[in-house]
Image (cartoon, rainbow, N blue to C red):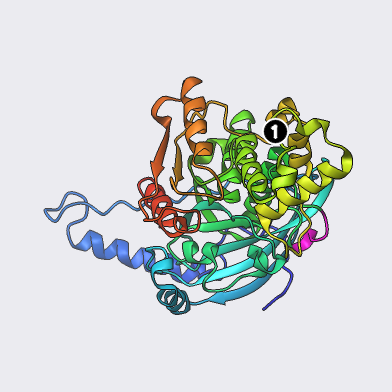
Amino acid sequence: MNQAQDLTPPAHRPPGCQPVARPALATLALVMGLLLSACGGSGGSGGGTVPEKPPEPPEPPVLPVSGPGELKSATSLKLISSADIQAAITAAGPKAPAVTPRYAVQTWRLNYLTVDGNGTAVEASALVCVPVKPAGSRSPVLSYQHGTTTKDAEAPSNHATADEAAVVMASAGYVVLAADYVGYGASKGRPHPYLLSTPTAAAVNDLLTAARYWRYTQGIKDNQQLFLGGYSEGGYASVAAFRALQSGASVHKAQLQMTVAGAGPYEVDRVLDELLAKVKAENKVLGLLLNPGFLKLLGDGDRRKVRELLLSKAIGDDADVVFDPTFLDLYLVDDVAGIEARSNVHDWKPELPLWLYHGRDDATVTYRASANALTAMQQRGAGNRVSLSDCPAQPSGHLDCVQPFWNFMLQKFGTVARDL
């Protein structure tokens, strides 16, 4: 397929539906009316006519936007059968989520405008997965944020395969949106604004806007339900996007039902404290200089070396994606206010359900990140709208808890989601 899509809005008719000749319908209605009248009709003992279901009101128009959230292009990728998705789930064994595919999934790449770490407009890309349902069917929308990946080939729109997380979840009945993030896909080569809350949230929420307009042009109906979820960096991105939606006035805010976030570094400076402790343990000489409060006193050369060690500890050494080190630079000069303003997403008051999930044995993103987020949010009055569930895996390390998180997330969404 692999073809660009015409984005001109059609008449309000589901894709693939053809109009039925009106004279035939009128004749059929007349015949049915005569038959019903002969079989009892009004005033007879056989009961009245069955009232017709009122027609569904037309969809309100969705207008395109200019700037962030603007849809630039849509390209059809693959149609993936439910049998192929089931085979991928079976092959994954215990690593796969507890999903039974109900639908084939049509995949698309959407390009849209968002912003990078400097606030500059950039064209980014995303994978959109649409379950193949009967014409006119509605679906809830699930915005899935992927975890940290150092390879562009693993970004969702470059990985539209039967074992892709977004595809598997779409086979359960959701329209799934999965942002590549800036630095991947269409924006590869630009620095990925890693753990910078504003551009991270924008990549998610601008996709919601672009995808909503695209669905309108294609007659793909949603049921006004939106869910946010992700693990690791995806957990961070989900919470950042939730916070940004809550503080704004977009239509997505009114549609959001809940957010489920796993093992995210919500309190970035606390996570970096843990990474710094590992660097000190593995680099004894340099470690003598790395005490709290002294980082900002290091020379540029030493500080750059520490940054490289921390970045290597966080993402490895074989990345083909460029990571923006701003979050590390703020940490290394002990800019507490800068980290709070530009990175942390743990200290605010959610007004809708937020389910946090974490493994106590996580050595990649400390459990304290979720525990501190829970405490901070409850101190602001969030109450039971925020909770923290422990991963039951043994051991409950970062990767050990990916599959249990999937099941947890889908179970929570499933308590509310309609039209699956």
Give the class, few, some or many, for how many residues have Cα within 10 Å of label 1's Cα (few <14, many ≥20).
few
User: What residue lies at 83% left-to-right and 43% top-to-bottom?
Assistant: 302
Determine whether 339 is above or below 175 in the image: above
> Which residues are the magenta region?
185-190
Give the left or right position of residue 328, taking residue 144 as reference.
right
Let me know if residue 145 is in the magenta part.
Answer: no
Front residue of 408/30: it is 408
User: What residue lies at 57% left-to-right and 67% top-to-bottom?
Assistant: 15
Front residue of 10/266: it is 266
Residue type at tag 1: Asn
Q: Quadrant of the image for the N terminus?
A: bottom right
Front residue of 11/322: it is 322
Let me know if residue 187 is in the magenta part.
Answer: yes
Determine whether 82 is above or below 377 in the image: below
Determine whether 3 is above or below 340 in the image: below
Determine which residue is flagged by label 1.
291
User: What residue lies at 72% left-to-right and 34% top-to-bottom?
Assistant: 342
